[in-house]
Amino acid sequence: MNYESKISGEDLDVSTLDDGEDEARNKKRFMIVAAVAAVIILAYVAYQVLAGGGDGAGAAGAEDSQAPAVTVVVPGRQDVVRTINATGTVAARREIPVGVVGDGGRVTQVYVDAGDWVKPGQVMASIDRSVQNQQVARLEASVASARADLNLAQANLDRAARLVERGFISKADIDRLTATRDSNAAQLRVAQAQLGETRARNSFLNIVAPKGGFVLERNIEVGQTVSPGSGILFRLAQNGEMELQAQLSESDLANISVGVSTEVIPVGTNKVLTGQIWQISPMIDSDSRQGIAKVALSYDQALRPGGFASTRITSGTSQAAVLPESAVQNDSKGSFVYIVDKDNKVVRRDVEIGSVSAAGLSITSGLNGTERVVLRAAGFLNPGQTVQPMVEKDKAA
């Protein structure tokens, strides 16, 4: 009995001891958690104080820290050579159509072809003149007969004049002989005029080059019968001179003048030809709102009348912003750039591109040169997006 009571007492003491230790451990854990919470609260308060003490400022700081960094450039303005690009049709500067001047006839020989050069007065084609030659022979005989009649009339008049002093010939006979002589002289002049007319007409039977130049077209063949109604048989470019009829807008026409140098590149070639504007159209097409500037060009094998060519016209200098190609974007609305405003927000700005040079693209409108323009990676940005701008010159420094 005593032994069992002793054992039960020992068991009771051990249980009481374990409960006390658990309570102490729980208190210790609570103190640790409370201390950690206090540290976290103090750290948060300190962060707010350092960040400006407000929730809005903290959010803005977080947003700025997450914004992408972009490289921007302030282009400024510089002197840019104004260049006008245009296209047009190549044509002869002075085109001369050649046809039949005389009566015409059957073509016996053609001496030139398209692509040949001719001199002024050179025979280009000959016409059969066998009938005309017989007409000339007949008229030559008529002239000879009229001259013989005149000589006879003059001799009769001379003999009568010697006899009138002796009284063998009356004054009336002298007047009659004088009239006969004058009539024969007139007939001789008529015959001579007819002969000269026929010879002149025959000289026009040949197709002759009225001016020297380059043969552009030939529309005549041997054996063909031609007449004044046959149309144009040859086309000549006087002295081989060509021109480009460049189509320009109203604003571009207002910025050029006669004598301005140009560069012309015929389509399909890499040749760069130098020319000068020699005429500016005084009228504007009411439908296309364009006019024509004619560029004078010397002959070159690359120039083919009726073909197309492009031209670059230098029309002075102007002040403009210049940007590299990487800064300019294009879409269905046209060319544009992204600029960064004072709040570091991305803003779209539509621009117009002028001349292109090794320095870059000149911006004729849309920028004044003081903007911060996104230099690269603009295709990954959106209007209104916040960024961290890094100026190109500062970055290089």
Image (cartoon, rainbow, N blue to C red):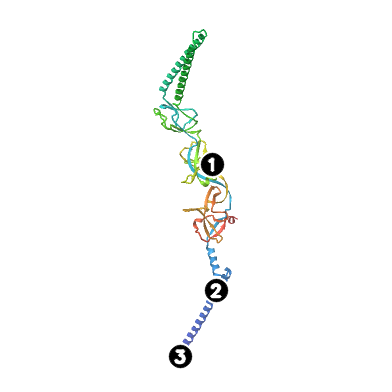
Q: Amino acid at mark 1?
A: Thr
How far is disc 2 from disc 1 in space, using C-alphas?
A: 77 Å
What residue did someone put label 2 on? 41
Q: Is residue 52 placed above or below 266 in the rendered structure?
A: below
Q: Position of residue 363 (x, y in %)?
A: 54, 51
Q: Quadrant of residue 339?
A: bottom right
What residue did someone put label 3 on? 5
Q: Which residue appears farthest toward the bottom when viewing the image?
A: 1
What residue did someone put label 1 on? 262
How far is disc 3 from disc 1 in space, using C-alphas?
A: 127 Å
Q: Is residue 35 placed above or below 299 in the rendered structure?
A: below
Q: Amino acid at mark 3?
A: Ser
Residues 240 and 148: in front is 148
Left or right, residue 248 beside residue 132? right
**Helix, strand or loop at disc 3?**
helix
Q: Position of residue 224 (x, y in %)?
A: 39, 28
Query: Mark 2, residues whose alpha carbon is within 10 Å: few (<14), some, or many (≥20)?
Result: few
Q: Are marks 2 and 3 in contact (CB under 8 Å)?
A: no
Q: Quadrant of residue 73?
A: bottom right
Q: Residue at x 56, y 58 (%)?
A: 390
Residues 5 and 337: in front is 337
Q: Position of residue 190 (x, y in %)?
A: 46, 20
**Helix, strand or loop at disc 2?**
helix
Q: Earlier in the sequence, mark 2 or mark 1?
A: 2
Viewer-nearest of discs 2 and 1: 1
Query: Mark 3, residues whose alpha carbon is within 10 Å: few (<14), some, or many (≥20)?
Result: few
Q: Amino acid at mark 2?
A: Ile
